[in-house]
Amino acid sequence: MNIYQRLTLVCLTTLLTNACQPDPHDTGGAGLVYCVEGSPESFNPQLVTSGTTIDAISQHLYDRLLDINAQTGELLPGLATGWLVSNDGLSYRFQLRENVVFHHTEYFKPSRTLNADDVVFTFNRILLPEHPFHQTATEYPYFDSMEWRQLVAEVKAISPYEVEFRLNKPDSSFLSTLATDFAAVLSAEYGAKLQAENKLPDLDHLPVGTGPFLFRHYQKDVLIRYFRHPQHWRQGSNLQQLVIDIVPDSTKRVAKLLTHECDVAPIPRLAELELLSKRQDFVVDVQTSMNVGYWAFNTQKPPLNNVKVRQALALAVNKQNILQAVYFGQAEQADSLLPPNSWAYQKPQLTEAYNPEKAKVLLAEAGFAKGFSLDIWAMPVQRLYNPNALKMAELMQADLAQIGVKARIVSYEWNTFRRKLTQAEHDSVLIGWSADNADPDNFLRPLLSCAAAVSGSNRANWCDEHFDNLLQQAVNTADLNERRAFYLQAQQYQAQQMPLMPIAHSKRFQVRSSNVSGVAINPYGGVNFAMAGKH
């Protein structure tokens, strides 16, 4: 049975099964259905780093002080119409946009528009342990990895529409941080209401933002329903509803595309792209994206705490086979965490090609001439940076066997997988990262800094003072040439120490019905339906 016959069979089965049942995903013809691979962990971007969650919530529900030009990476006004940086790099003042309306929902009716109090409330929640909402979250992983509490001295309102951030030290990546999906601005008035009602956790579960859509309903592992925010400060969306249809299985997602139960779906299996691209009722969008898929070694677990062992494992894996069998040639080999289109990228001089014989020598030098056993954790979901982690793990398992290393492949349900990963139960893991802005710090610090090891986004659990010092020196200066030099040193050092092995930088794919417009792929991750329409 070829792929078209198999998908058609699934489509017919789906249609027959649901023929007599009301469809909870129905938008009444006035909306759009976006099919995704997993459920969100939260409805507040402050609390997550998962691309699955960010795609499902951030651009739909919230706005940020700054936006990013998807073509150039330039920072643009968002909720802030302008900003001023002091000469010493320690003060950032933002002039806020007026008449920005928060969501009116069944559980909250705002009495005022956005002002400086909302920005102070949002960022002081992360900054101050005494903030009433600080302890309702166990962690703020992205901000913790950026050492927010060590960096920011104070956030205060200068006037109703002016906010100042005072820093303890200069940080040339600070503005880029405020443009990430994680820096969503919340409602202080909503927070005060929840505090009065002793319902503090609702801030993260029943969201209120200023974004183009407002929250209406969520059923775990089934769907999220958003309604149009009619008073959004930007040009309003043409959609009355946006449904996030949660479909973990790729074949079922494609089946729903074929029956037009889904209007848009991200990261289809590359083997299915040929089928979809030949049909006139679909458009396949592709974009070179700022991402990296990698294999992280838990450096706190022997023998992975031995640099020669890590180097041997990296030399034993044939990346070119992975690029063909997993990415179908739609990715380029990664030699660094930074993709080649980053302004700070330079191929590390220490990078070595596939060399199993040298890997055996290194293992012997490390005292493991007869090999050892380890687990490879493989994501159960597709992600942009790794469309098939299980297949990748199988290829690596065969490669490692050639040097005497016995690999066991481990996987769990996605939320369980992420929870156990954060608790560092893994030996090694196939995972990845999609950048939220053009700054190289957005790759290196969340993935490999000591602070990120504490917050949980550093899957290698690697803490190296020399590496951290290089990152710190890079953000201490605004001179691009100086920053580039420090980042080059950091890339070289990472390649030598090998806490993780970069594998691939993948192109980003999206399939949409040909009657859907205004859904462009963003190279910095996330997806935005604010300008989407159907015709």
Image: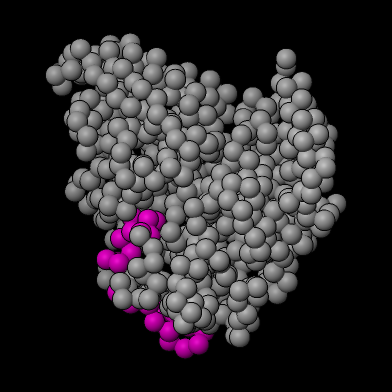
Query: Where 115 falls versus 245 (above or below)?
Result: below
Identify the residue at image location x=55%, y=48%. 39
Residue 311, by quadrant, is top left
Q: In this view, does 215 lie to the left or right of 238?
A: left
Q: Is residue 403 left or right of residue 435?
A: left
Query: Where 370 falls versus 134 (above or below)?
Result: above
Where's residue 83, x and y in %? Answer: 48, 75
Identify the residue at image location x=63%, y=40%. 247
Residue 412, by quadrant, is top left
Please name whichever residue, 177 or 414, is drawn nearer the observer in this view of the structure.
414
Where's residue 133, x and y in %? Answer: 40, 72
Give the tally of numbered discs.
0
Identify the residue at image location x=77%, y=62%. 240
Q: What stretch is highlighted in magenta?
A: 139-164
Residue 269 seen in the figure: yes
Question: Which residue is the extreme one toward the front?
Answer: 20
Where's residue 107, x and y in %? Answer: 61, 74
Magenta-colored stretch includes residue 262: no
Q: In this view, does 266 lie to the left or right of 173?
A: right
Query: Where 284 falls versus 195 (above or below)?
Result: above
Magenta-colored stretch includes residue 162: yes
Q: Quadrant of the N terminus?
A: top right
Please name whichever residue, 395 or 283, is drawn nearer the observer in this view of the structure.
395
Identify the residue at image location x=77%, y=20%. 5
Residue 486 seen in the figure: no
